Amino acid sequence: MNESNREDKLREETKNWTEKLFHPGLEILQREGEEKGLKKAICRLYEQQTSQWPQLKLAVENAAKTEIRNIRVAGRRVKFQYNPARLANVTASTTREEIAKRPCPLCPHNLHQPQKALPFSEHWFVVCNPLPILREHMVLIHRQHRPQTARGILKDMLCFTELTGLATFYNGPQSGASIPDHLHIQATHPGQVPLVRQLPPASESCSEILFQQELPQRIFLYGKTYSHAEKLFKETIAAVNRQGGKEESDEPEFNLAVFKRGVGEVPVVVVHPRHRHRPSCFYLKGERRCIVSPGAADMSGLVILPRREDFVRLDGRKMRSIYEEICLPENRFTTLSEKLEERLNR
Ligand SMILES: [Zn+2]
């Protein structure tokens, strides 16, 4: 693409987003700046959208009424959420052919007519998720239509979580993202996500990386600064790739979650390395089928089940075997943690 085409494309993208801007929130950002005003501007957007957009209002009410079952897997709490509205997302086909056939749901001209957006940093627009699973469920959409990749996004996730208190979640293109052709990050109120109460405290010796072998396996990164957290993340991804026999710069299968810590502390980053996109029961027929397609929320202990029969039938033992299939084999996770610790302590 030559320079003038590139400029035209950028102008066109910006114009499309301009039509979606939420002006009362924008005024807050302009008056108070992003650092002070972002949380307030997002709250204002959420209030406006949930009162003025009937379809979202209903979806939020339905999400608040969803049935929940609490179970235990490997001694930790996991919540099942029965959420029929998520069926299309959970079963979305993410093959290149299917993606090419449909209009991109995250490009501004395809957003819902009443849907409004707020800018965040230089790359993102924030909108309300039209099919929420939790309170204050937002989506950060990259301003350009470009494929889902974690490269370069962690700093913005850390910053958004620190400023708003909302947890941010990233699903890899082969690990739960239902729209892998347009880069996006999910953000929600963290209160209902079991993982938020299972975060190990960084020890007094200021551990920068902690491993949890129990299913679903987790790697916790405690950066002292944003760039320190980014370095730890990069090392982790490179180690997962080396271990899987891939190029260090490739994107392995994984999910990512970022949770706020105390004031002035860099949010904690949680990496869930993955072995598979979907468990084998997803593909079975008849009674043995279970429609579950784990993404970052499911790996964080909130398992979304769009069919009642699965919600009623699934138990801790079966959920453990689902995690077992989609997480790394135990010996691979052990080797990964040893190699990574060795490398970071070198
Ligand atoms: Zn798009």
Image (spheres, helix red, strand yellow):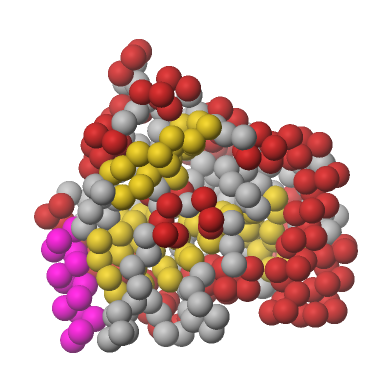
Examine the rendering and report whether any part of residue 321 can be seen.
yes
Rendered view: 302 above or below 338: above
Would you identify the image quadrant in which residue 15 lies?
bottom right
Would you identify the image quadrant in which residue 84 lies?
top right
Query: At x 23% / y 42%, what residue is drawn?
Result: 324
Residue 178 image position (x, y, % from top left)? 51, 41
In the rendered image, the quadrant that contains the N terminus is bottom right
98 horizontally vs 71: left or right: right
Query: At x 24% / y 81%, what residue is drawn?
Result: 344
In the rendered image, the quadrant that contains the C terminus is bottom left
321 horizontally vs 254: left or right: left
Question: Foreground residue, 9 or 204?
Answer: 204
Rendered view: 26 above or below 58: below
Residue 159 image position (x, y, % from top left)? 57, 74
Examine the rendering and report whether any part of residue 97 can be seen.
no
Query: At x 78% / y 46%, what residue is drawn?
Result: 50
Q: Farthest top residue?
A: 286
Q: Which residues are magenta?
A: 333-346
Question: Foreground residue, 329 or 60?
Answer: 60
Query: At x 30% / y 56%, what residue is drawn?
Result: 273
Residue 212 image position (x, y, % from top left)? 25, 61
Question: Foreground residue, 287 or 78?
Answer: 78
